[in-house]
Amino acid sequence: MEYFPLLELREEIQALVVERVACNSFQDLYGLKASSKSMKALAERRGVYYFYDVLSVPWRLNMPSQLLKSCYAEENPSTLYIKDVQFYFTFGLQEEGLSLMKCAADAGYERAVYTHAITQAIFLCDG
């Protein structure tokens, strides 16, 4: 495989690469972070947390709670989805759960789009 000089690109392009990697794979993101100090700094910027899909990480890895909190603070769609399911189904907070579910769905998070449509149909039928 041929070497690609990522570090020679403008920082804005490097940041876009880091965001896309964060979308696709935690393993690749951590590999990218380990590759250089500048990649690590880009991967730890606040905006990158929005792009993680926390549900793509195997649960046996025990994701650090601070990472989940950072993702939630960035209104990361996958963490909003986790919270909405928890609020709606575990705590019985239907309106709050639907609100978070709608936010995740509006952000294009596929699981939330489906769950929101089905749950809203059931919620409206019960109401």
Image (tube, helix red, strand yellow):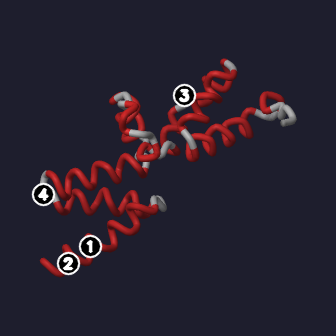
Contact between marks 4 and 2 (CB within 8 A): the answer is no
State the residue position of label 1: 120
State the residue position of label 4: 92
Q: Residue lying farthest bottom? A: 125
The three-letter code of the residue at mark 4 reads Gly
Of the numbered discs 4 and 3, the one sitting upstream in the chain is: 3
Contact between marks 1 and 3 (CB within 8 A): the answer is no
- Residue drawn at (84%, 36%), measured in percent from left and top? 1
Q: CA distance from mark 3 to mark 2?
A: 41 Å
State the residue position of label 3: 44
Contact between marks 4 and 3 (CB within 8 A): the answer is no
- Residue drawn at (61%, 35%), measured in percent from left and top? 28
Disc 1: CA contacts within 10 A as few (<14), some (14-19) or many (>=20): some
The reply, left or right, for residue 28 in relation to residue 14 is: left
Contact between marks 1 and 2 (CB within 8 A): the answer is yes
Q: Residue lying farthest right? A: 2
- Residue drawn at (30%, 73%), measured in percent from left and top? 118
Residue 103 appears at what percent x and percent y? 37, 59
The reply, left or right, for residue 109 in relation to residue 32 is: left
Of 15 and 117, nearer the camera is: 117
Using the image, determine if residue 4 lies above or below residue 53. Answer: above
Q: Residue lying farthest top? A: 37
Of the numbered discs 3 and 2, the one sitting upstream in the chain is: 3
Residue 26 appears at what percent x and percent y? 53, 37
Disc 4: CA contacts within 10 A as few (<14), some (14-19) or many (>=20): few
Q: Secondary structure at mark 1?
A: helix
State the residue position of label 2: 124
Disc 2: CA contacts within 10 A as few (<14), some (14-19) or many (>=20): few
Of the numbered discs 4 and 1, the one sitting upstream in the chain is: 4
